[in-house]
Amino acid sequence: MRFPKISFWFVFFLVLLGSCKDKKQKTITSESVKEKQISPSNKSSFQFNEENAYQHIQKQVDFGPRIPGTTAHKECADFLFSELQKYADEMYAQETIVYNKAYGEMPCYNIIGSFKPEMEARFLLCAHWDTRPIADEDGSFKPFDGADDGASGVAVLLEMARLIDSFSLPFGVDIIFFDVEDAGSHNGDASDTWCLGSQYWSKNPHTPNYIARKGILLDMVGSRNALFAYEGFSASYANDLLLDVWRTGQYLGYGNYFINLRSNPVTDDHVYVFNERGIPIIDIINYNPTTKRGFGSHWHTQNDKMSVIDKQTLKAVGETVWQYLVKQKF
């Protein structure tokens, strides 16, 4: 595996600083998921607030396209660090330089918030926050907002951070916003040109010998009429986790989002997290069997803007992941 040129990183406050999806997907009918009785937590301050998540998307979009090396990219990094810092017990900022054949050297900022960092049992939540430099799927080859592809997963996790801070989970949680996920190439065997931030973190975790019991990656989780299928690598890496999360979503009434179908593997951040760190992790990612590459029709186009975002989709994903976390005992 070719790994990009790296300059060393380091942590601490005042340091503030590609989707990995070239393979086509196809539908494979899977066995039905049996309903599991889950009692939602009381609906007070512990309820996922989709309005908060929506506003977090809007804030990121307001900076402009978060293309590595731009002013918008740096300003958004500062915002994400300061916003996550409101809730996390400990913060880390990995600053490095990664190399991409198409764009050369690119600054990379992985932003990490740890909750209960002293606890050995840990759960990893992650999403990427950068936007692809160009909209190449619609032929415009111009920057685009990346409201869904990038901002939506981050927004759900920022709202999750508020909940985790308010609710005493019996394990530690790490939230990571990976950078430079979306600058990869579609030409030939170029899978390792994607997910450069997670490739770096997976080889250089924020704490030595980092491990988590389980992990969930969110990617494109905010668009209207989104579908979430059993992504192929997820089914291989952590099938029990995958099925439990889908059961949770279906029990909560979100079976129209969490569907009993399997899609082809997608090269996304979870691939490197699993391969390098051995963490069982799944990817909740929008699936559309009618498009060329199996993603939403707005993917890597000028249409990936606030108008595609639906608060009900944010609620479905956010409530599902939150209720799954609340029920974990490990």
Image (spheres, rainbow, N blue to C red):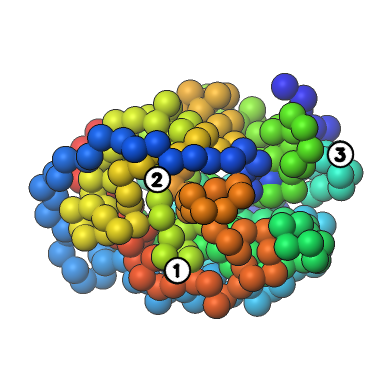
Mark 1 residue element = loop
Query: In this image, 306 relative to 171: left or right?
Result: right
CA gap between label 2 and label 1 equals 15 Å
The reply to whether discs 3 and 2 touch (Cβ–Cβ < 8 Å) is no
Tag 1 or tag 2, which sits nearer the N-term? Answer: 1
CA gap between label 3 and label 2 equals 32 Å
Residue in front for this viewpoint, 307 or 162 = 307
Measured from the top left, where is residue 38 in percent x and y?
Answer: 14, 50
Quarter of the image containing the C terminus?
Answer: top left
Tag 2 or tag 3, which sits nearer the N-term? Answer: 3
Residue drawn at the location 61% of the way across and 49% of the way down: 292
Residue drawn at the location 26% of the way across and 55% of the way down: 255
Residue in front for this viewpoint, 164 or 291 = 291
Mark 2 residue element = strand
Where residue 105 is drawn, which disc sits there?
A: none
Count neighbours of disc 1 (C-alpha within 10 A) and say few if under 14, some if 14 to 19, many if 20 or more: some
Residue on which disc 1 sits: 224
Mark 3 residue element = loop
Where residue 101 is drawn, which disc sits there?
A: 3
Q: In the rendered image, is residue 167 in sight?
A: no
Circle 1: residue type: Arg
Q: Is residue 211 above or below residue 140?
A: above
Measured from the top left, where is residue 272 in percent x and y?
Answer: 58, 31
Residue on which disc 2 sits: 229
Measured from the top left, where is residue 19 in percent x and y?
Answer: 63, 48
Q: Quadrant of residue 192?
A: top right
